Amino acid sequence: MAKQQNLMGHFFKIRPLILGLLFVGAIAITGCRGIIAAHTNRQPQLVFASPSDPATFNYPLNTSAFSVFGLINEGLITQNGETAELEPALAESWEISDDNLRITFTLREGLRWSDGEPITAEDVAFTYNDIYLNPKVPTGIKDILRVGDSFPEVRALNPRRVEFSVPQPFAPFLRYAGGISILPKHALEESINTTNSSGDLVFLSTWGTNTDPREIIGAGPYRMVRYVPGQRVIFERNPYYWKEDEAGNPQPYIESIVTRTIESDETQSVAFRSGELDSLGVQPEVFSLLKREEERGGYTIYNGGPSADSRFVGFNLSTATNAAGRPFVDPMISGWFNRQGFRQAVAYALNREKMKNNIYRGLGEIQHSPLAVNNPFYRGPEDGLRIYEYDPERAKALLLANGFRYNRNNRLEDEEGNLVRFQMLVKSEEKVRVDAAVQIQQDLDAIGIQADLQVVNFNTVIQKLQNRDWQAYVGGFGGGSVEPHSGFNIWYSGGSLHQFNQGPMAGEEPIQNWQVSDWEREIDALFMAGVGELDEEKRKEIYGEFQQIVAEQVPFIYLVNAFSLQAVRDRIENIRFTALGGAFWNLHELKLRAN
């Protein structure tokens, strides 16, 4: 997942370890793409472009892949963007007990928050015990920290040493314990211990986007200085950041960063070609044009091969009702979606080879699994994974075998004579995703199904998904972690991103009649087994079985795994591009060459 990672899956792909754990994502929900950067000759700065404003400045409450946290936050350890190896960050070292049940981190000496206050082990313990594991704080981070029926215990041993312990073996223990952003106790403790007149923690309304950015405190390489909604966020180098080069010079070298809000792919492409931007996540429809102009434009297009992001068609399988007894999904439509044969028929009806060649211009691979093809836990067709080659006649036969029928106009009906028609949600900002949705609409029309497109902006998509106010959607999750458990909050039946059958979430009105299927419970059991198994080969078998269940049940029909393509101006030095980390995972090392 991701990959909604930083743990919230922000799309920058520069610093955080758990890049895709929640909004793999962002969110995860969006499968958002890479960074866009610009350079001015007058100031030593980069300008990034985000398709959306940040949703919040409160890290645990973030549900968007477009965020500020990769620049302002830091964890105990980080992930190398080339090798995926774990490396020290706020912690200079760590020790793992012989029984694999305890990790003790030692913080670096002299660490300070962006306001100059010292960072200690008490901040780490507070971050986990009082925020992430607080039952009154509705954060998806809690999902991935679950160990069986409990959570890790965290305690400060002294100002520089903090111990994490778990009741049973937990395979991603180090990655999770060390990779999540640490938050400042001195700035947030009062809000976490105070309630408002409604009985809610003050923390839940703390550090919203209406907060003065200068009040937001972090341990990352930058700190915010200004936010203009709909336009930009401005960052300056954090003078208290711990990292320095071998000569003792403070890092990062670049003094300031600006993130501009530029919603559409087309507008971003125009800005890049006009010289405003130094880097662009290259979409298939502009690849040929940009490639021809590569030398003249003074940039390089990097190709990292298939990305870890995913794109899919998802179905809302929920049969639940809200507190007033109103179904989230029309029971008739939910009845169609909950037939396995219906979902498989749709999978056979989609011409993904055509989608790859026409929409992605051949710059991708057909995707069959929730895990990327370069993931060591991936199970592919050659390993027996069920796949769905384009076969509209087989799709029709499956529909007929599952109680549907065709009328005289060759339109699909259910047993009661209701035309099979539903809404399909897609975000407007990503042209290739909208184009894919249009082809899906056409492919379904060819087998008698009418899918009405709802093309809306990203924030509206997020709101609808959170409110369960959708029927089908063309979505995605970001990648960034090779750990399969990073998708736990997507696949666990009680997970915060279990979108296709979202259960009750903390802080919301009660829902009724939520039902969990047998195959969802099987996946729950597999994830619990996988996280407790330390033998890599046995883990591969467990997560292979998980992928097989997903392929059989198809709550998501995976589409095309696009190549990771990014154009970066040659005047940005020390770029070490990978599909895992993007162009800016080593932001602290980057320099701007003088013209």
Image (spheres, rainbow, N blue to C red):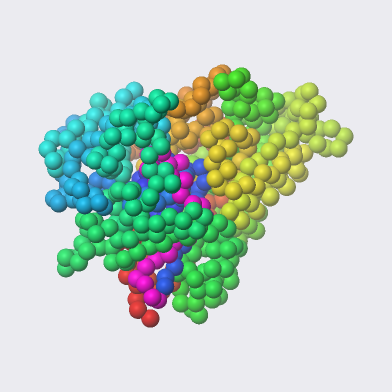
Q: Is residue 225 above or below residue 418?
A: below
Examine the image and state in which quarter residue 531 appears: top left
> Which one is in front, 255 or 351?
255
Q: Is residue 273 highlighted in magenta?
A: no
Q: Is residue 306 above or below residue 206?
A: below
Residue at (80% x, 36% y) in the render? 411
Residue farthest to the front? 197
Residue farthest to the right? 408
60 sits to left or right of 379: left
Whether residue 392 is visible = no
Quadrant (top left/top right/bottom left/bottom right) for the N terminus: top left
Quadrant (top left/top right/bottom left/bottom right) for the C terminus: bottom left
Position in image of residue 543 (x %, y %): 42, 36
Residue at (56% x, 20% y) in the render? 323
Examine the image and state in which quarter residue 40 appears: bottom left
407 sits to left or right of 588: right
Q: Is residue 571 above or below residue 356?
A: below
Residue at (24% x, 40% y) in the render? 186
> Which one is in front, 342 or 383?
342
Whether residue 555 is visible = yes
Q: Is residue 391 above or below residue 365?
A: above
Position in image of residue 252 (x %, y %): 28, 63
Q: Is residue 44 highlighted in magenta?
A: yes
> Which one is in front, 16 or 413?
16
* Magenta segment, prevailing SS (helix, strand or loop): loop
Residue at (78% x, 23% y) in the render? 416
Position in image of residue 313 (x %, y %): 60, 41
Position in image of residue 222 (x %, y %): 31, 57
Q: Which residues are magenta?
A: 41-63
